[in-house]
Amino acid sequence: MNKTLKTILITLAVIVVVLSSFSGGFIAGHLIPLGSSGRPAQIAPAPTQSAAQQSATLEQFQTLFKPFWEAWNLVHENYVDQPVDDLKLMRGAITGMMESLGDPHTAYMDPQTFTDANADLSGEYEGIGAYVDTTNEYLTVISPIPGSPAEKVGIKSGDKIVKINGEDMTGVDPELARRKVLGPAGSVVKLSIARQGESKLLEFEITREKIVIKSASGKMLDNNVAYIQITTFGDKTTQELTDTLKELLAKKPKGIIIDLRNNGGGYLQTAVEVTSQFLGKGVVLYEQYGDGKRTQYDVIPGGMATDIPLVVLINEGSASSSEITAGALQDTGRAKLVGVTSYGKGSVQNWIPLADSQGAVRITIAKWLTPNERTIHGKGLTPDVVVEMTAEDFKAQRDPQLDTAIATLMAIINGQAIPTSVPTSVPTLVPTPALIPTP
């Protein structure tokens, strides 16, 4: 590349940096679901440049990027397989820049990844139906979507996808592995899973489906208890929740159980809206920034169920926005949490689209704190009543966590002591995923 062209490109880069402080918006996101999960949130002004950025001259940029252009030229002049793919080189450079920050949640998303990542919050997509973590050595399941093909065959939180259709994923970028799991409805994918406590790989054949997700739904249980399951915090969640509350509250329930198990998260703003349906006032969360500044998110007045007794179910698949809601309800004393410790996703990412549909960058911009200023990142929320869900429970269609939630709620209603173990007097119920219609 000649000097003139490099100068032009650097000049354009400087112009883009300057203009970006006046245009564009943020897209905030959380967990990446398998074949879905973009987490766009509210639009906010782009950040202003630092004084150092504003004072940087063209000459300083030329000096800073000199090694980059040297490497660029060396690849073009010496690499064995020519011509090289300039677009791929550019995207690789952005990927490396994001990875150099050492934060697993800060990353570059190429256009296809960004498109995939924004699919599920609209309510439907095709795949096996699982939220996954692409920051580990292997593609790792955070939680199967209730009612999905993944959930029906027994995929669990923490499962590591070691092989896909017999192909070893060792050393393969987990994001590439995620794409290999994707496919049209009706097709079959074979997964070899490494699961903690199992000495051998577990083999699964999963028929992909069109996953239609109703993010909030409910029904009445015995003892006049209302049950609401929230599976994600997406585009339609607030409306679906208020519709569900209208229907259930008309039946005059004694109390409500909110099921956030295997809820991988979603929009931060939706978490505030959902929480506000159950809190009359106060703080939902704080965002703590690296420079010490803090943003406070308050309860939105006018919630529909701010006084009725409340219990919230969580598990290891409850992450991000679901932890915001559960943490706020626990800290304020509004609800008791039942289940096992949640995932522990306590940082906030902005998903910022790049120009010309070249994907987006996901950048961690803050940590969030509960109303009592607890940070749950890497720790999770500890339930008030701890109840495990075993493989035997799953196979036998038992749900001791829900059983205990019912017993806990009835104890609250009747002014009795909160149970500390699985009750024997409450009949076993069909697991909650049955509420989600199968596509």
Image (cartoon, helix red, strand yellow):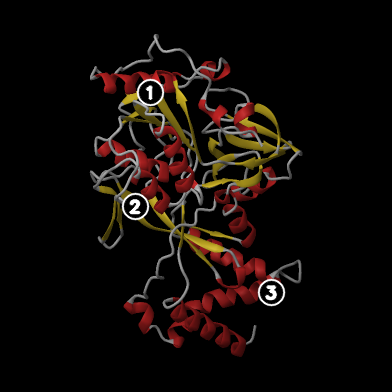
> Is the residue marked by circle 2 packed among few (<14), some (14-19), or many (20+) residues within 10 Å?
some
Q: Amino acid at mark 1?
A: Ala
Q: Quadrant of residue 76?
A: bottom right
Mark positioned earlier in the residue sequence (1 or 2): 2
Q: Let me know if residue 22 appears in the view.
A: yes
Q: Which residue is mark 2?
A: 367
Q: Is residue 286 left or right of residue 340?
A: left
- Asked if marks 3 and 1 touch (Cβ < 8 Å), the reply is no
Label 3 vs label 1, nearer the camera: 1
Q: Secondary structure at mark 2?
A: strand
Q: Is residue 34 above or below residue 204?
A: below
Where does the image place residue 134, in percent across and percent down from the top left?
Answer: 55, 47
**Quadrant location of the N terminus?**
bottom right
Q: Looking at the image, which residue is at 63% across and 68% down? A: 89
Label 1 vs label 2, nearer the camera: 1
Real-space CA distance between mark 2 and mark 3, rounded to the nearest whole angstrom = 41 Å
Q: Looking at the image, which residue is at 38% across and 51% down? A: 347
Q: Secondary structure at mark 3?
A: helix
Mark positioned earlier in the residue sequence (3 or 1): 3
Q: Which residue is mark 3?
A: 76
Real-space CA distance between mark 1 and mark 2, rounded to the nearest whole angstrom = 30 Å
Q: Which residue is mark 1?
A: 405
Where does the image place residue 152, in percent across and percent down from the top left?
Answer: 62, 28
Q: Quadrant of residue 322?
A: top left
Residue extending farthest front: 250
Q: Secondary structure at mark 1?
A: helix
Mark positioned earlier in the residue sequence (2 or 3): 3
Q: Is residue 203 left or right of residue 20?
A: right
Q: Is residue 106 above or below residue 135?
A: below
Q: Is residue 45 above or below residue 163?
A: below
Residue extending farthest bottom: 4
Disc count in the image?
Answer: 3
